[in-house]
């Protein structure tokens, strides 16, 4: 399968005298999942997820990253087709993905989902969705969450599958084609602001299915090498405050970073303590 990348590849040039053993890492995200992965006004890919990788790249002499973007539905096939080495788009852990792709040891954010509906008919819980038509993006981890809920609560609501994007889904909600969805609250609010529809939407404060966000790698020897390098440097970004700074800048809060310790990762007080316990 050929994956069409929308724009030129962007790379961070390192010292020309760098070792020839430096691993070239092809990074891909999507262009429209702000504030996590998106394209800015200068046509550069950025966002919290991408900037974390750039920070790892700055620390790690073993790698040199180049960045491109593509559509959501070609992101994982790009790993399959050896178009990319690592992909990022707030990817959670699922059994199906674990069979096909390589997860690193450490996540870079703890995030959750919220019910998104209209301001005229606000809904705050899965129970509020009873009898409603609920939008679900094909292949999304949020869709998996809703499908799992329906496995336990048959006929609670009807899923309407959308082979599209989050902005399209929000448009369907405000225009009455569906009643609600379940998705990332930060991303939804950011997209609603861009579209000028934030006042027409209700985004619940209740967070469901909190989970870790990971970068995904191809299940190859090269993929394992890169994952090991990411795992080597990501803890340093946590302990030196870089992850918190990036979260505050792009997400408006670092609660998703500090919550990682509350949920079992980076529980030591210092990097030195963490490294000592890892040995």
Image: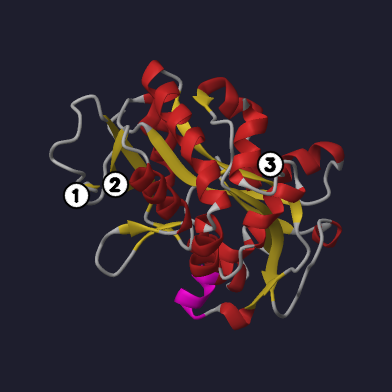
Does residue 205 lie above or below 150 as drawn?
below
**Viewer-side residue, 233 vs 206:** 233
Left of 102 or right of it: where is 69? left
Left of 58 or right of it: where is 181? right
| Nearer-N-terminus badge (2/3) | 2
Per the image, label 1 sits on a secondary structure element best described as loop
Left of 80 or right of it: where is 130? right
Instruction: Identify residue for label 2.
Output: 68
Magenta stretch: dominant secondary structure: helix
Does residue 159 lie above or below 250 as drawn?
above
* Dot 3 alpha-carbon crowd within 10 angstroms: few under 14, some 14 to 19, many 20 or more: some
Instruction: Identify residue for label 3.
Output: 265
Disc 3 versus disc 1: distance between alpha carbons? 36 Å
Residue 163 in the image, given as x and y percentages of width and height: 49, 47
Q: Residue furthest top?
A: 221
The residue at the point 40 percent across, 16 percent down is 221
Disc 1 versus disc 2: distance between alpha carbons? 7 Å
Magenta part of the protein: which range? 190-196
Q: Residue furthest left?
A: 16
Disc 1 to disc 2: CB gap under 8 Å? yes
The residue at the point 54 percent across, 30 percent down is 103
């Amino acid at each position: 399968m050929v994956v069409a990348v929308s724009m030129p590849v962007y790379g961070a040039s390192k010292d020309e005298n760098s070792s020839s053993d430096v691993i070239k890492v092809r990074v891909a995200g999507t262009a429209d999942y702000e504030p996590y992965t998106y394209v800015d006004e200068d046509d550069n890919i950025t966002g919290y997820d991408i900037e974390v990788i750039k920070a790892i790249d700055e620390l790690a002499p073993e790698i040199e990253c180049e960045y491109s973007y593509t559509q959501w539905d070609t992101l994982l096939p790009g790993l399959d087709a050896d178009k990319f080495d690592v992909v990022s788009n707030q990817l959670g852990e699922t059994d199906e993905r674990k069979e096909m792709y390589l997860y690193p040891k450490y996540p870079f954010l703890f995030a959750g989902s919220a019910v998104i509906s209209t301001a005229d008919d606000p809904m705050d819980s899965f129970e509020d969705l009873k009898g409603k038509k609920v939008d679900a993006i094909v292949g999304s981890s949020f869709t998996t969450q809703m499908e799992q809920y329906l496995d336990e609560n048959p006929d609670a609501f009807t899923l309407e599958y959308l082979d599209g994007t989050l902005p399209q889904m929000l448009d369907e909600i405000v225009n009455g084609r569906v009643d609600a969805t379940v998705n990332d609250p930060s991303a939804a609010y950011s997209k609603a602001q861009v579209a000028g529809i934030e006042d027409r939407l209700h985004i619940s404060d209740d967070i469901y299915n909190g989970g870790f966000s990971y970068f995904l790698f191809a299940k190859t020897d090269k993929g394992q090498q890169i994952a090991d390098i990411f795992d080597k440097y990501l803890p340093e970004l946590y302990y030196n405050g870089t992850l918190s700074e990036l979260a505050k800048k792009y997400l408006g809060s670092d609660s998703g970073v500090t919550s990682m310790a509350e949920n079992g990762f980076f529980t030591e007080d210092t990097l030195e303590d963490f490294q000592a316990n890892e040995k």
